[in-house]
Image (cartoon, helix red, strand yellow):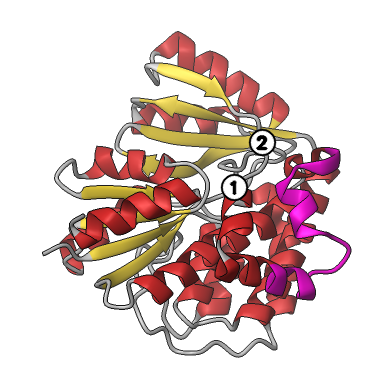
Amino acid sequence: MEKFGLLFSGQGAQYPQMGMDLYNKDPLFKEIIDRANAVLTNMDLVAVLNNEDDALSQTKYVQPAIVAVSLGLFTMLKRDIPELPIQAMLGLSLGEYAALIASGVLEFEEGMQILQDRASYMQADAQAKASKMAALLQPDIDLVKQICQDCTTNEETVSIANYNSPKQVVIGGSVGAVQKAMTELAEKGGAKKVVELKVSGAFHTPLFVNASQKMAKRLSKVTFAKSNVPVISNTTCQPFDDKVADTLVKQLISPTHFASCSAYMFDKLGVNAVLELGPGDTLCKFVKQVDRKVARYHIENYEGYQAFLDAIRGN
């Protein structure tokens, strides 16, 4: 029997029109988007999903949009397959907020408001100092760490920001330091391939310390409920405990460990199937590199949702 781990998409998976077929065809999905829209300030979620004025290139808009789409899909699942055996939830960075809301740790409206503030803080840091990120395919981790250390100075920093899978990590930091590290990695064989990413900032690096400090203040008065299913933290590689706020504050300046979190679900929680909710299937691809035996599903549109229902119901 398949026991599911739900995966929630992270930033970078967005694309114009994401979720709009669901919005137009499923009343419950539309209700969730409209409900989120009602508590968000100075933004129109439908306009963002349609990428009006290039909205999906801006962190402050894209984060609430991705999470709202993921939660819309999750709510549809609860309606149509309430018996689906969900053993754990795991989001990549931003996706942790979708997981925390879906699991009941954060109430929907408050969670969306916190998320909007987080996105605003992160956009401010991204605009304050130029930064960049690069994905490394088949990296030599020890060599990557050494090169990052050698390229970091008092003025500029570069470090591993994401441990995505056994075959991919991402480095991030100041433009000059990252560029220097990319050159050295290519020269010294630190990775089979180095690919610069199109992102608005080097998330999960020390460059986001201001956003982290603002989040500490923002979360200090938030009451977190007990999760009804384990939510695995990218930061600790363990289920969130009673220190949710502290972990979310650290998350902004700490590397993500999606690969280790996936392994925890499989080894400790009996998960043998994953379902990615949200734009793209990047997380399913990472999971394949962690454990090829795990069944993988993803839903990002109406057609995919119907196909998943058919698969689960044996149609």
Where residue 164 appears, as percent x and y from the top left, is 40, 42
Cα–Cα span, label 1 and label 2: 9 Å
Neighbour tally class for label 1: few under 14, some 14-19, many 20 plus, Cα within 10 Å: some
Neighbour tally class for label 2: few under 14, some 14-19, many 20 plus, Cα within 10 Å: some
Residue found at the very far top of the displayed protein = 187
Seen in the image, is 245 located left or right of residue 169? right
Where residue 204 appears, as percent x and y from the top left, is 58, 50
User: Foreground: 282 or 267?
Assistant: 282
Is residue 257 visible to us here? no
Are the residues flagged by discs 1 and 2 in contact, CB closer than 8 Å? Answer: yes
At a point 51% along the width and 16% down the height, the residue shown is 184
Residue 122 in magenta stretch: no
State which tag comes first along the sequence, 1 or 2. Answer: 1
Q: Callout 2, which amino acid?
A: Val
Where residue 57 appears, as percent x and y from the top left, is 75, 39
Dominant secondary structure (helix, strand or loop) of the stretch shown in magenta: helix
Residue bearing the label numbered 2: 199
Residue 11's tag is 1
At a point 56% along the width and 75% down the height, the residue shown is 246
Report the span colored magenta.
Answer: 34-53
Seen in the image, is 14 located left or right of residue 82? right
Q: Above or below — where is 304 with respect to 108?
A: above
At a point 53% along the width and 75% down the height, the residue shown is 101
Give the foreground label among 1 and 2.
Answer: 1
Check disc 2 and report its element: helix, strand or loop.
Answer: loop
Residue found at the very far left of the displayed protein = 1
User: Foreground: 13 or 173?
Assistant: 13
